[in-house]
C-alpha cells in the first residue's frame, strides 16, 4: 500500500504512488432510495405485506396494525433504535472529518505532518517534487513547501547511464578519478620524482603529451612511435597507463585532410596495443591564440571526421572535447573572422554584430554527442585581478565559479555552466585536461607551496568531488617553461621540481594527511603505488 513521508532535514518530499484501492475524499454515494429524510431505506418482509422503517412512507393498511404480533413490535423497536444509532454515528464521523479538514483555520495551527495512513486510509498526496530546466540549462528539483515558497537545488548526476559510457579508453571506477600530469620531457624523469625511484611515491595514471600535426612521417608505425616517444621510450610508463594525446593542427584545420586522418587512426591503433588513448584534438579552439581557433564550422566538421575515423579504427581511443573554460570570454579580439562570414555568424550567438561577452563561449564549437566521449577544458589560476603581479592563495570560488559560468569576482552569471550543460546534462565524464597555477617569480605574497597546495586540494577534496561527481580525471601541468604571452616570464608549474612541494602532495593524498587536506586517498586511482601507508 502507498504511504507518504516527509524528510524534515532536507525538506524533500518522498512520495510513493497512491494505492489503487484508495477512497476518494469527494462526494460519497450510497445505494438506496430516499424520501427526503436523508437516510437509506430499510426493507423487510412479512407474511402479510411489505413494511418500511420510520421516516419512510408506509404502505401498510391500517386494518392490519392490530394483527402484528409482539415479536414484530419488538423487532420494530430494535430497528428504530438501530437506525437512530447509525444516524448518530454517521453524523459524528462527518463532524470529525470537517473539524480535521479545517483544523488550521479552527485552531490556528501551521504544523505540517504526515504519517503512515495504513491500508484502509484515504490517501491525500502532498505536493509532488518536479524536475524542470533552469534559465541556463541546469536541471533542478523543486519542491513546494507548506508556505508556498519553492526551493531549488542542483541535482547531481550520481552515476553514468550505461549507454553514455565511452568504452574505448575506459573509465575510472565509480567514486574514483585518475590523477595525472602534462609533460614536455621524458616521462622517466617525472616518474623518478613522483615515485622516489619506485620506493615511496605514486605513478600518475594518465599522462598528457603534445604533438604537432601534420608531419612528414608517412608510415603509421613510425608515427605511433614518434608521437608517444617521450612517454613510452624509456619504459617508465607501464602498459595500461592512459595517454592523453593533445593533437595540435599547427598548419591550420584545412591541412587536416582525409588521408592524414586515416594515417593517425592507423597509428593510434598501434598505440592502443599497449595504452588506451584520450585524443584532445585542437584544444582551446574558442580562443584566438592558435591557428585553429575561432573557426567553429570548420572545427566541428574536422573534429567529427577525426572522431569517426578513430572510433572505427583505433579500438581503445576516445575523443576529449576541451575548450578554454573561463569567465572572461571572448578573452581578446585575436583571430576574429570578418563579420560577413559564416564562421563569424556561428560565433555571434546574440546576433549583435560583434564578438562580445554576451556570446556563447562553447556551444558553437561543440561537435555533437555522438563523437564526444569526454568533456573538459583548461583551467589555470593566475591571481585575483589583471595585471597579475603578486601571488595569492587560490579560493574555492575561483574554481567553482569558473566551471559553472560565473564571474570569479562577483559571482554573477556570465555564461552557461560548462559542467552542467556538457557534463551533467549529457552524462559525460569531465576532465581538467590541463590544470595548474601561475606563481609569479617576482611577485610578493604567497609561496609556491602555498599556492600549489591550495590548488590541488581544491581540485581533489571531498567537497569538490561531491559537488562535481562527473569529475573523473585531471592532468597537472608538470612543466617549467618561458611563457611568451606573459613577457617571457619563466614559470615553474611543477609539483616535482621542489622536494618540499612533492612531499606535501604525497602527504595530502595519503591517509596521514587526509584530515587536513580533506582528500579521500581511496578516491584516487594511480597506475602504481609505492607508499607503505597509502
Image (cartoon, rainbow, N blue to C red):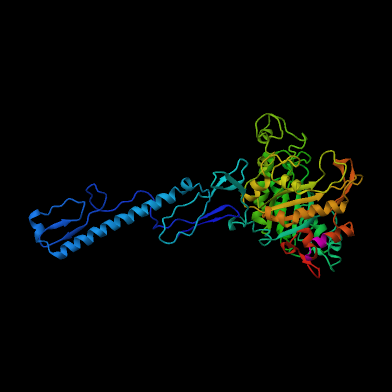
Image quarter in which the C terminus is found: bottom right
Pick whichever, 324 or 78, lies toward us: 78
Position in image of residue 167 (x %, y %): 64, 59
Q: Is residue 222 magenta?
A: no
Pick whichever, 29 or 256, lies toward us: 29
Q: In this view of the protein, can residue 219 be seen by the observer? A: no
Position in image of residue 459 (x %, y %): 75, 53
Position in image of residue 511 (x %, y %): 78, 65
Q: Is residue 504 left or right of residue 399?
A: right
Q: Is residue 484 above or below residue 351?
A: below
Q: Which is the main secondary structure of the residues drawn in magenta?
A: helix
**Which span of residues is magenta-colored?**
505-511
Position in image of residue 206 (x %, y %): 76, 58
- The number of discs equals 0
Q: Residue at x 89, y 59 (%)?
A: 500
Q: Is residue 232 above or below residue 325?
A: below
Q: Residue at x 76, y 47 (%)?
A: 379
Image quarter in which the N terminus is found: bottom left
Q: Residue furthest bottom?
A: 532
Pick whichever, 206 or 473, lies toward us: 473
Q: Residue furthest right?
A: 442
Q: Residue at x 78, y 44 (%)?
A: 250
Q: Is residue 521 left or right of residue 35?
A: right
Q: In this view of the protein, can residue 441 be seen by the observer? A: yes
Q: Residue furthest left?
A: 63
Q: Quadrant of residue 515?
A: bottom right
Amino acid at each position: 500500500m502507498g504511504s507518504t513521508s516527509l524528510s524534515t532535514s532536507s525538506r524533500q518530499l518522498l512520495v510513493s504512488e497512491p494505492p489503487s484501492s484508495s477512497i476518494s475524499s469527494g462526494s460519497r454515494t450510497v445505494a438506496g432510495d430516499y424520501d427526503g429524510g436523508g437516510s437509506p431505506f430499510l426493507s423487510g418482509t412479512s407474511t402479510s405485506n411489505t413494511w418500511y422503517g420510520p421516516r419512510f412512507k408506509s404502505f401498510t393498511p391500517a386494518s392490519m396494525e392490530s394483527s402484528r404480533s409482539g415479536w414484530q413490535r419488538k423487532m420494530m423497536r430494535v430497528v428504530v433504535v438501530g437506525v437512530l444509532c447509525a444516524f448518530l454515528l454517521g453524523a459524528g464521523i462527518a463532524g470529525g472529518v470537517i473539524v480535521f479538514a479545517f483544523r488550521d483555520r479552527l485552531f490556528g495551527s501551521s504544523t505540517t505532518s504526515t504519517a503512515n495512513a495504513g491500508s484502509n486510509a484515504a490517501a491525500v498526496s502532498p505536493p509532488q517534487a518536479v524536475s524542470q530546466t533552469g534559465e541556463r540549462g541546469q536541471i533542478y528539483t523543486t519542491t513546494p513547501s507548506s508556505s508556498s515558497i519553492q526551493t531549488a537545488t542542483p541535482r547531481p548526476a550520481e552515476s553514468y547511464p550505461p549507454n553514455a559510457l565511452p568504452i574505448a579508453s575506459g573509465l575510472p571506477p565509480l567514486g574514483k578519478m585518475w590523477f595525472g600530469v602534462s609533460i614536455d620531457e621524458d616521462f622517466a624523469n617525472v616518474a623518478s620524482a613522483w615515485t622516489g625511484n619506485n620506493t615511496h611515491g605514486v605513478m600518475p595514471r594518465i599522462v598528457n603529451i603534445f604533438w604537432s600535426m601534420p608531419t612528414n612521417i608517412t608510415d603509421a608505425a613510425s608515427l605511433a612511435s614518434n608521437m608517444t616517444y617521450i612517454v613510452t621510450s624509456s619504459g617508465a610508463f607501464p602498459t595500461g597507463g592512459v595517454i592523453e594525446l593533445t593533437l595540435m593542427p599547427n598548419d591550420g584545420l584545412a591541412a587536416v585532410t582525409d588521408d592524414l586522418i586515416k594515417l593517425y587512426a592507423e597509428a593510434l591503433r598501434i598505440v592502443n596495443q599497449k595504452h588506451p588513448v584520450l585524443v584532445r584534438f585542437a584544444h582551446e579552439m574558442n580562443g584566438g591564440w592558435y591557428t585553429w581557433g575561432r573557426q567553429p564550422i570548420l572545427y566541428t566538421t574536422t573534429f567529427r571526421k577525426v572522431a569517426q575515423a578513430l572510433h572505427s579504427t583505433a579500438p581503445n581511443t576516445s575523443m576529449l572535447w576541451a575548450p578554454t573554460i573561463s569567465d572572461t570570454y571572448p578573452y581578446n579580439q585575436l583571430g576574429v573572422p570578418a563579420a560577413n562570414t559564416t564562421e563569424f555568424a556561428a560565433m555571434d550567438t546574440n546576433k549583435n554584430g560583434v564578438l562580445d561577452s554576451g556570446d556563447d563561449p562553447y556551444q558553437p564549437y561543440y561537435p555533437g554527442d555522438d563523437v564526444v566521449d569526454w568533456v573538459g577544458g583548461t583551467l589555470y589560476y593566475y591571481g585575483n585581478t589583471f595585471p597579475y603581479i603578486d601571488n595569492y592563495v587560490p579560493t574555492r570560488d575561483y574554481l567553482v565559479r569558473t566551471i559553472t559560468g560565473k564571474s570569479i569576482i562577483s559571482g554573477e552569471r556570465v555564461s552557461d555552466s560548462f559542467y552542467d550543460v556538457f557534463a551533467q546534462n549529457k552524462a559525460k565524464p569531465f576532465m581538467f585536461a590541463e590544470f595548474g597555477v601561475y606563481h609569479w617569480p617576482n611577485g610578493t605574497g604567497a609561496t609556491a607551496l602555498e599556492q600549489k597546495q591550495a590548488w590541488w586540494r581544491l581540485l581533489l577534496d571531498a567537497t569538490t568531488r561531491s559537488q562535481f561527481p562527473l569529475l573523473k580525471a585531471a592532468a597537472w601541468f608538470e612543466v617549467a617553461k618561458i611563457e611568451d604571452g606573459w613577457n617571457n616570464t619563466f614559470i615553474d608549474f611543477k609539483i616535482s621540481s621542489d622536494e618540499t612541494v612533492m612531499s606535501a602532495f604525497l602527504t595530502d593524498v595519503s591517509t596521514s594527511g587526509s584530515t587536513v587536506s580533506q582528500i579521500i586517498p581511496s578516491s584516487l586511482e594511480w597506475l602504481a603505488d609505492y607508499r607503505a601507508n597509502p
